[in-house]
Image (cartoon, helix red, strand yellow):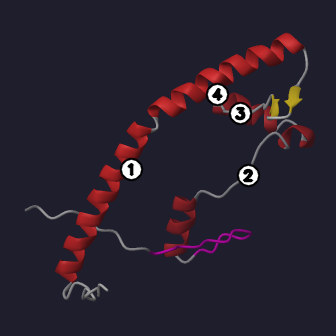
Amino acid sequence: MTTSKAVAPPATPQDRVKSFVRLRDYKKAADAEFKRSMKRVNDAMTKLEGQLMKDLQASGGKSISGESGVVYIKTVSTATVKDRSEFLRFALSSAENLEAMDVRANKKIVRELADKGTVVPGVNYTELKSVGVRRGKS
């Protein structure tokens, strides 16, 4: 029967920083090694996806199902603004066109206004605090 000794936590803030940095470095190296180890798997899956897309296109359908599973076409859409002035002119030209625009608050400006005592109506502003650790110079 083996007994494990309890390991005392680091005693000082500097000891805890040193431990944190060491663990973060270990985690980063382990993540990189895992990513490298998955390259062949990811490459093989990408190749299969290409072949399956050809199969779907050849079938003329949107999906192919079988005992092993179902393959189907997914569509991901993006819309980015390439000319801000042109887009705003369009969006603000009518109430219907206004729906083409998402509205969100600029957190930097909201914070600056809050620091000056101005509460922006209709906006919830939240700050979450967490711990940051930087490596020492030694």
Residue marked by disc 3: 78
Looking at the image, residue 36 sits to the left or right of residue 70; the answer is left
Residue 64: name its quadrant.
top right
Q: Earlier in the sequence, mark 3 or mark 2?
A: 3
Q: Which residues are magenta?
A: 118-129
Instruction: Say which amino acid is labelled 1.
Output: Asp
Between disc 3 and disc 2, the foreground one is: 3
Q: Position of residue 8 (x, y in %)?
A: 24, 88
At horizontal 25% and vertical 88% (from top left) the residue drawn is 5
Residue marked by disc 2: 103
Residue marked by disc 4: 83
Cα–Cα gap, marks 3 and 2: 17 Å
Residue marked by disc 1: 31
Instruction: Say which amino acid is labelled 3.
Output: Thr
Instruction: Say which amino acid is labelled 2.
Output: Val
Instruction: Say which amino acid is labelled 4.
Output: Asp
